[in-house]
Amino acid sequence: MAVPKREEAATTRGSRIFDTLRQDLVNGRFEAGQKIAISSLRERYAVGLSPLREALNRLAAYGLLIQENQRGFRVPRLAREELDDIAEMRRELEGMALERAIQHGDAEWESELLAAAHRLKRADMASAEVDQWELLHARYHRTLVAPCGSVWLLRFIDQLHDQFDRYRRMAPGVPEIRRTLDGQHSELVELALNRDVKGARALLEHHIELSYQVALGSCEGRLE
Amino acid sequence: MAVPKREEAATTRGSRIFDTLRQDLVNGRFEAGQKIAISSLRERYAVGLSPLREALNRLAAYGLLIQENQRGFRVPRLAREELDDIAEMRRELEGMALERAIQHGDAEWESELLAAAHRLKRADMASAEVDQWELLHARYHRTLVAPCGSVWLLRFIDQLHDQFDRYRRMAPGVPEIRRTLDGQHSELVELALNRDVKGARALLEHHIELSYQVALGSCEGRLE
DNA sequence: TTTGTATGAAAAATCGATTATTTGAGCTAG
DNA sequence: CTAGCTCAAATAATCGATTTTTCATACAAA
């Protein structure tokens, strides 16, 4: 598998450092546009040069880093234009995937979806549990579209989620919008279980649009 | 840039070997399902271990290799189910991209598209020039959708093309279908220049469907 | 026979050191 | 001044060697 399943523990240093770096990049723990100083990462993560470089190469192919020959790696800049692109693609691809998921999803899917939504609702976004909430949130969205029947579509959606979250996670929380978004998670489950293909798709696209508004507002000033 | 532009010469060994391997993998010069013997590649391409491993890591993240922790790399198997998936995604994504390209493409695009189509028509598929034809074919299709306005969409389309070609290029040529497909290249240009959005999209989807038939027939017996 | 376990060769992953390239400070000529 | 040059320090890329893990085989016990 190109990108290791996030569930299974990565057993090589290269894979471990890949996962760690992916999370740190998505969480905005590196400044956008910043040059990656390989030797300082080496210290920071206490890892050798070879596995580190292999991980950086993977991240570049995945789109979370920019690789320039003889000039090492850089963190991609945040640009409003690109956020527009990412959000638009999410609407298209996740909308497509959700339609298919609703058509193909079986009873087992219904159960898992209910469970994922419930776990998400119970999780507290406050305090130091943000990472946990983010994990459950990502799982919920993946579960929603999982039975769409296309491995490649799911792969692209995952990739876009990581890109989108680079923007969203540095957004200041807007409690009112947050409540709306949380409500939509439950409504989506309901529509999906009722096999309301069009309604669910419309709501999901609206949900992404609203998240996009949050992501946009947050990054203002930082964008080029 | 995650995946180096194919136009610009790769200047590091890692990037050169990445490009070479990508082409060789797409051209089916490795048996599907085969395990990659790293040290034999080292000899075959006369390259050191570090740049080679970095290239393999990139190819795995790109989807042309499967990476298994502690077990090295394998060439992905060919499976009818996956070809179906890839072709279906190509239809959806390239169809979407073409609509947008026709809406946004300017006069310069029209010229480049005409040029790309002409070069392709003049190229001979016979003899040892197949590689050249494949290059022009890929360029034609990229030009067709280039002004769609979405970097991510283009990226996914490129990736799907490489995947699709793994199947198509080991197909035995079917001269009659080949002529039809070649004709469609010209027709597509005409429809695009006439800004016939729906017509062009329909033809492109038909074109992909026909290529899919070729790819399917060819791989029979080899598929699992 | 079957199942489990030891073992050594093969291969993957990693490390430490070397080589090649870029970058920027200081200098020079126009 | 400023554009261009030189050279040394910084950093990226690569190499050769070492460590770790897997895999196939042989052997032992049930």
Image (tube, coloured by chain):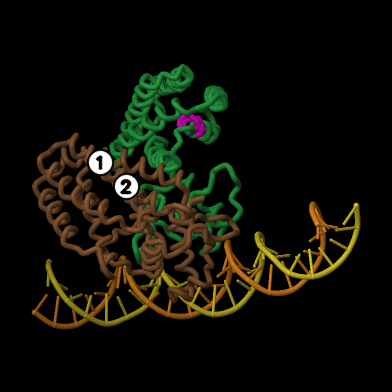
Chain colours: A brown, B green, C yellow, D orange
The residue tagged 1 is: A97
The residue tagged 2 is: A157
The residue at the point 42 percent across, 20 percent down is: B184
Which of the labelled discs sits on residue B70, or is there none?
A: none
Q: Answer with mark 1 or mark 2, whichever residue precedes in sequence.
A: 1
* Image coordinates for residue A146, horizontal then vertical, percent: 22, 48
- In the rendered structure, the residue with mark 1 lies on which chain? A
Q: Which residues are magenta?
A: B139-145
The residue at the point 39 percent across, 56 percent down is: A166
* Image coordinates for residue A8, horizontal then vertical, percent: 26, 64
Mark 2, secondary structure of its residue: helix
CB-based contact (under 8 Å), mark 1 and mark 2: yes
* CA gap, disc 1 and disc 2: 9 Å
* Image coordinates for residue A185, horizontal then vertical, percent: 19, 50
* Image coordinates for residue A144, horizontal then vertical, percent: 20, 48
Q: Quadrant of the N terminus of chain A?
A: bottom left
Is residue A71 positioned above or below B174 on the image? below
> Tag 1: Cα neighbours inside 10 Å, few (<14), some, or many (≥20)?
many
Is residue C29 positioned above or below A51 on the image? above
Queried whether the magenta region covers residue B110, the answer comes back as no
Magenta span: predominant SS is helix
Report the front residue among B103 and B46: B103
C24 vs A184, left or right, is right
The residue at the point 52 percent across, 27 percent down is: B126
Is residue A31 positioned above or below D21 on the image? above
Is residue B60 visible in the rendered image? The answer is no
Give the amino acid type for the residue marked by disc 2 in the picture.
Ile
